[in-house]
Amino acid sequence: MSDEKKIIIDEDFKSQVAAEREALAEESSPTKEATGAPAGQELPPASLEMLITSLATEAMMLLGQLPQMGSEKVEADLPRARYTIDMLEVLQEKTKGNLTPEEEQAMGDLLHQLRMVFVAIQQVPPTTTDS
């Protein structure tokens, strides 16, 4: 048996983030003139959910759980991932009392998931490849 630790990633969480991004992208958005977006690349409406989803997606990329934007490269950057998670924590603290119960629950669940992934990744020893 191998002593190698395995990281278990909640695939439902990844799917939820992807689905939320797609749903927000499909909603009506400002026109090209208002956003400056190239044709065919309309931006979703600005919202708390979009901000949270953007930060969560960035954190997942920095945790090495999603490919980097514009490439298929998957690489972890734990200091930047921790910073992004910290930013979400600041957002949670500063919006306390101003969120709906559903938003508070979603924010808490999201932060818990990101923290668990961060801790799990820190516990896995780095792999080395000999050339």
Image (spheres, rainbow, N blue to C red):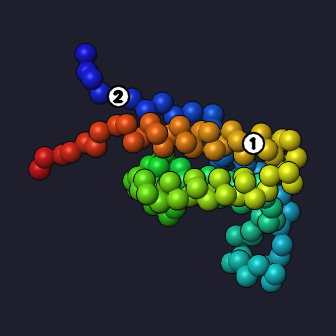
Which quadrant holds residue 95?
Answer: bottom right
Label of residue 5 in the image: 2
Q: At 34% across and 37% down in the image, what residue appears?
A: 124
In the image, is residue 19 above or below residue 8?
below
Q: Is residue 78 visible?
A: yes
The earlier-in-sequence mark between 2 and 1 is 2
Residue 49 rendering spot, x and y as whole percentages: 77, 54
Q: Nearer the viewer, residue 108 or 94?
A: 94
Label of residue 55 in the image: none
> Dot 1 corresponds to which residue?
106
In the image, is residue 35 above or below residue 121?
below
Residue 65 rendering spot, x and y as whole percentages: 48, 45
Per the image, label 1 sits on a secondary structure element best described as helix
Q: At 43% across and 32% down in the image, what residue appears?
A: 7
In the image, is residue 19 above or below residue 35?
above
Which quadrant holds residue 111?
Answer: top right
Q: Amino acid at mark 2?
A: Lys
Q: At 60% across and 39% down in the image, what residue appears?
A: 113
Q: Amino acid at mark 1?
A: Ala
